[in-house]
Image: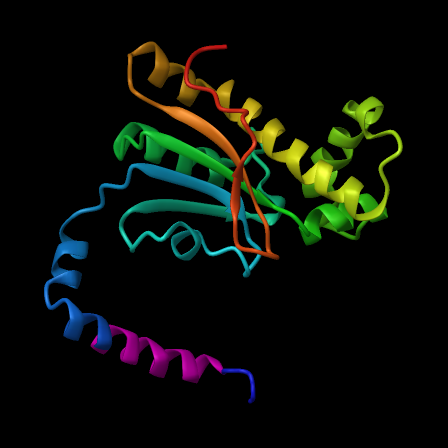
């Protein structure tokens, strides 16, 4: 079977729309009337980790930001504007930082220097390896990569918990928690890494 083309996607979209309306004639009317998600998902751009599908949510229930290796650069205006909009306007109650095992960005960062902007973007991964060197002793190959995937999630939760956006929400008493999860491509299971934050630290 050949790979779909962009034209095929338009055909599939029409079929999906028709099927959705036949099952639930009011679906798109409800969806267009408001956006009121409880969750902000900050995940990896990897095409194998679709937020809605793996959480069993429908469109409108989760606000999504994705980038290579789910990194929360404090200077990333795109991410910070998404966070601000999600917290201040949509008033999401939970931020989910979601990494995944087998992350290509982390593999690339650990393999050495990369050309262009990707090298700058992935530098925090190498910094995590340096920062946690003592607990990574003896780990190699997939075991090392998997542990750094987990540490990366924890680091991004910590970074987000120190942003002014999150602090201001907590100071005004807005319910807001930040969680760190990791996803396995091998069985489709999300795991809580127990690094949640829900107050000023």
The residue located at (67%, 42%) in the rendering is 121
Q: Nearer the viewer, residue 96 or 111?
A: 96
The location of residue 53, given as percent across then percent down, is 40, 57
115 relative to 171, above or below:
below
Q: Nearer the viewer, residue 182 or 32?
A: 182
The kind of secondary structure the magenta stretch mainly shows is helix
The residue located at (34%, 10%) in the rendering is 171
Would residue 193 appear left or right of 170 to someone viewing this image? right
Would residue 41 appear left or right of 141 to someone viewing this image? left
The location of residue 7, given as percent across then percent down, is 42, 84
Residue 78 at least partly seen = yes
Q: Quadrant of the N terminus?
A: bottom right
Q: Quadrant of residue 54?
A: bottom left
The residue located at (58%, 43%) in the rendering is 99
The location of residue 3, given as percent across then percent down, is 55, 83
Does residue 13 show up magenta in the picture? yes
23 relative to 8, above or below:
above
Q: Nearer the viewer, residue 151 or 66?
A: 151
Residue 117 at least partly seen = no
Q: Quadrant of residue 86?
A: top left
The location of residue 197, given as percent across then percent down, is 47, 20
Does residue 7 show up magenta in the picture? yes
Part of the protein shown in magenta: 5-18
């Amino acid at each position: 079977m050949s790979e779909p083309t962009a034209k095929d996607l338009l055909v599939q979209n029409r079929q999906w729309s028709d099927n959705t309306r036949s099952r639930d004639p009011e679906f798109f009317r409800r969806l267009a009337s408001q956006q009121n998600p409880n969750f902000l998902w900050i995940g990896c751009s990897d095409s194998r980790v679709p937020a809605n599908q793996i959480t069993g949510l429908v469109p409108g229930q989760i606000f999504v930001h994705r980038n290579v290796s789910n990194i929360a650069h404090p200077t990333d205006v795109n991410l910070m504007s998404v966070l601000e909009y999600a917290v201040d306007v949509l008033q999401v109650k939970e931020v989910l930082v979601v990494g995944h095992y087998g992350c290509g960005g982390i593999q690339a960062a650990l393999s050495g220097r990369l050309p262009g902007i990707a090298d700058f973007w992935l530098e925090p991964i190498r910094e995590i390896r340096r920062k946690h060197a003592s607990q990574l002793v003896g780990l190699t190959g997939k075991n090392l990569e998997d542990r750094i995937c987990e540490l990366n999630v924890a680091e991004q939760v910590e970074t987000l918990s120190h942003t002014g956006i999150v602090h201001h929400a907590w100071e005004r008493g807005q319910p807001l928690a930040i969680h760190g999860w990791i996803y396995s491509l091998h069985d489709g299971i999300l795991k809580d890494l127990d690094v949640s934050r829900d107050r000023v630290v």
